[in-house]
Amino acid sequence: MLILSLSFAGCTTLPDDRLTARARIGEPLAAQRLVVLPRPPAVQAENQAAVTAAVRVAERNTAAVLERREGAARVRAEALAWLVGHPEGRRYLSLQAPRALARGAPAARCPAVSVSRAPTTGGAVSQALAQCLARVATLPDCGCEVLAYDDILAVPRTEMAYATGTTARLSAPALGLDGLFVAEALGLERVLLRGLGGRLGEAVFDGEGGVQVVLDGASGAPAARFEGRDTLIGWRRGRLARRITARDGEGRTLVLLIGFSPEELAAGAGALLAPEAG
């Protein structure tokens, strides 16, 4: 059985990722300056009924108001890793204000993100929260928070962490695969899987819960194609943690956990590796 152990869970870049944020997204987006505060006013809603109150908070706290507060600073977007690293963060930066960006909360178990632009700041915030809340409506105890609106970072800067490379825990007993690998995001719909010997394969998502995992025969592993279901768990260091369960044409099973730290796996998340019946 091929057992590998390789983890980049705490890293913000992989060893061969030498591009700066400015080179990845271009100077106009990287040069945007957002108002950052140690403890900005929270713009959040636990349900659709609370959106109106959240909008009022955003409308009261304009950039001109927040810049006068102690500890306020204007920070270049390229210094805020999530905004320049995540595709939806880059989409937000590409929009002209009024604009808003919302994410599920608590982030660790509410996997949603939405970006909106509207004629007014209140409208952009309202739309972003409403869209985000609709995406977590079936999950227990999930709300949404605005990460940014117009040129304001609405959460502490520590919320902008973004891990380019994260841990992938793979179990495919029939192929002799069991261990830790590296998952590298290739946009919203693809994840590259790497082992110690290099590329292992990739996962391709259809955006509706379906996924294909293609192992291409590299790194000493056999080539195989699996199809199955992608279940989003929540946010870890700016990336979505997810559980993939899949089968190939021969009925062999694969379970892949992406985004969980080795510590979290050891503490109990590893139970998610158990294949489902049927």
Image (spheres, grey):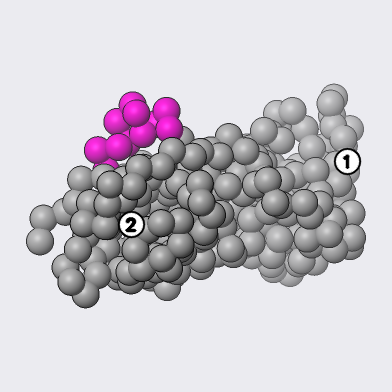
The amino acid type found where label 2 is placed reads Ile
The residue at the point 85 percent across, 24 percent down is 70
The amino acid type found where label 1 is placed reads Arg
The residue at the point 71 percent across, 61 percent down is 90
Residue that carries the numbered disc 2 in the rendered image: 244
CA neighbours of label 1 inside 10 A, class few (<14), some (14 to 19), many (20+): some
Q: Quadrant of residue 84?
A: bottom right
Considering only order in the chain, which callout, 1 or 2, is on the residue closer to the N terminus?
A: 1
At mark 2, the secondary structure is: strand
Residues drawn in magenta: 262-272
Residue 274 located left or right of residue 134: left
Residue 149 located left or right of residue 193: right
Work out whether residue 250 or residue 64 is closer to the camera in this orientation and state it.
Answer: 250
Mark linked to residue 261: none
* Position above or below: 190 against 181: below
Residue 226 is situated, as x and y percent measured from the top left of the image, at: 30, 68
Q: Is residue 130 visible?
A: no
Q: Quadrant of residue 31?
A: bottom right
Work out whether residue 221 or residue 254 is closer to the camera in this orientation and state it.
Answer: 221
Marks counted in the figure total: 2
Mark linked to residue 74: 1
Residue 139 is situated, as x and y percent measured from the top left of the image, at: 33, 50
The residue at the point 58 percent across, 34 percent down is 10
At mark 1, the secondary structure is: strand
The residue at the point 78 percent across, 60 percent down is 24
Residue 130 is situated, as x and y percent measured from the top left of the image, at: 51, 59
Assign the C terminus to one quadrant of the image: bottom left
